[in-house]
């Protein structure tokens, strides 16, 4: 797999059989997997099994993997986003197909479809195919995981509201979906059906792309040289390149730093990235919850990366954890985020909290990261709901 690590380190990290799966927040479509539609504001375990190794949120649904390599989903399913060959809402985990080789997959559930890279380097998608975003050569809805082409050289995947992007193991970058607001990174920001891609198309000829993550219309991406790049729509400074509402239809570098490690979750008009020194940075509209600092409850916008700190001038912590454990909301304007620290596997959450999605027992919005009790391995944030492994 070259130097592009996947989402889970072999069977939950070196010998562990897995973890308990927990969820909290909004449960309007059964996206918490508790067997009903009751929302909760603190983590509640899904069943009693301790064999889960990955879980990520889409918009009102969740996709998860067990240590036996099986794939599971629950929540909203109106366009087949659960991949269980139906459009039936599921309030408890249901197995997706019968394959048992999803272990070590990179999951990217998005608003209306899901993309996954398996450990063998194959790329799979399902859900709504509007704008061609499934990459299957059409705009049809697909209710079961379907392989994109026949290649086995894919390494990373990420989506936004109307499309997505993929990286191959050779470091090339590919985009798919709606050609609007520069989201395809092909130099064209026009909104026309003829500009959509229904199969992945390579962006330029560079071979040093490494990790990516979606925002509302566009992506963030870290290269192998540690530089950070962005493209797409820039409402509220979401691109982080200092432009201020300037749409970028081709990748543009954010600043000049060369120690960026991994982009993380965003909520529409926000974004963020982890540095190799363990510092966490964010930008865009703070009311979206995608970045946080000492400005408790003060709506503001950062056009360039701003370090996460709990008090003015206090500096940022240096033990935030990456390795694709940071995943976030890829749709909607009212967002929240969270990640795990490397010291003690401590989970921190921040942002909007209308449905208890922060997991701290109430529904009060918090801008600066707060700790959630327990020893956590991984967290994923969706639209007003969260899943975590501990």
Image: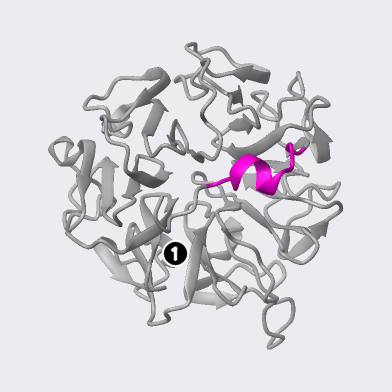
Which residue lies most toward the left here? 194
Q: Answer few, some or many: residues within 10 Å of disc 1's Cα (few below 14, many 20 plus, some between 14 and 19).
A: many
The quarter of the picture where the C terminus appears is: top right
Q: Which one is in front, 352 or 253?
A: 253
Q: Would residue 296 be seen by someone viewing this image from the given angle?
A: yes
Reply yes or no: does residue 180 show up in magenta.
no
Reply yes or no: does residue 15 show up in magenta.
yes
Q: Which one is in front, 294 or 262?
A: 262
Where does label 1 land, which residue? 236
Please state the horizontal and vertical placement of residue 339, each as a whole percent of the image: 67, 57
Q: Which residues are magenta?
A: 7-19
Q: Is residue 42 left or right of residue 211?
A: right
Q: Is residue 356 left or right of residue 270?
A: right
Q: Which one is in front, 287 or 344?
A: 344
Where 126 sits versus 359, above or below? above
Type of secondary structure dominating the magenta stretch: loop
Where 300 sits versus 79, above or below? below
Please state the horizontal and vertical placement of residue 381, each as a whole percent of the image: 62, 45
Which residue lies most toward the front here? 15
């Amino acid at each position: 797999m070259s130097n592009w690590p996947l989402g889970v380190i072999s069977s939950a990290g070196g010998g562990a059989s897995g973890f308990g799966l927990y969820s909290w927040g909004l449960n309007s479509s059964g996206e918490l997997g508790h067997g009903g539609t009751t929302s909760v504001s603190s983590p509640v375990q899904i069943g009693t099994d301790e064999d889960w190794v990955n879980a990520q949120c889409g918009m009102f649904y969740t996709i998860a993997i067990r240590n036996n390599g099986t794939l599971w989903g629950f929540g909203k399913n109106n366009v087949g986003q659960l991949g269980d060959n139906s459009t039936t809402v599921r309030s408890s985990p249901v197995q997706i197909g019968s394959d048992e080789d999803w272990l070590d997959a990179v999951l990217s559930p998005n608003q209306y479809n899901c993309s996954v890279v398996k450990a063998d380097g194959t790329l799979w998608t399902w859900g709504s195919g509007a704008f061609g975003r499934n990459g299957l050569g059409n705009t049809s809805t697909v209710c079961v995981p379907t392989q994109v082409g026949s290649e086995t050289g894919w390494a990373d995947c990420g989506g936004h509201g109307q499309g997505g992007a993929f990286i191959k193991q050779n470091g090339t970058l590919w985009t798919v979906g709606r050609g609007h607001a520069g989201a395809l990174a092909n130099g064209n920001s026009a909104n026309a059906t003829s500009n959509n891609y229904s199969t992945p198309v390579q962006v330029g000829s560079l071979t040093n792309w490494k990790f990516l993550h979606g925002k509302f219309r566009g992506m963030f991406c870290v290269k192998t040289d540690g530089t950070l790049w962005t493209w797409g729509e820039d409402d509220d400074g979401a691109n982080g390149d200092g432009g201020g509402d300037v749409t970028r239809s081709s990748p543009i570098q954010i600043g000049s730093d060369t120690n960026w490690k991994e982009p993380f979750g965003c909520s529409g008009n926000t974004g963020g990235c982890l540095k190799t020194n363990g510092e966490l940075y964010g930008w865009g509209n703070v009311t979206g919850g995608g970045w946080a600092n000492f400005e408790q409850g003060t709506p503001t916008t950062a056009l360039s990366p701003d370090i996460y700190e709990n008090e003015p001038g206090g500096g940022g912590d240096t033990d935030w954890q990456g390795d694709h454990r940071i995943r976030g909301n890829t749709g909607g304007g009212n967002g929240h985020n969270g990640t795990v620290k490397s010291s003690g596997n401590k989970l921190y959450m921040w942002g909007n909290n209308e449905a208890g999605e922060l997991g701290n027992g109430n529904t009060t919005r918090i801008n600066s990261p707060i700790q959630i009790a327990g020893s956590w391995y991984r967290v994923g944030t969706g639209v007003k709901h969260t899943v975590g492994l501990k």
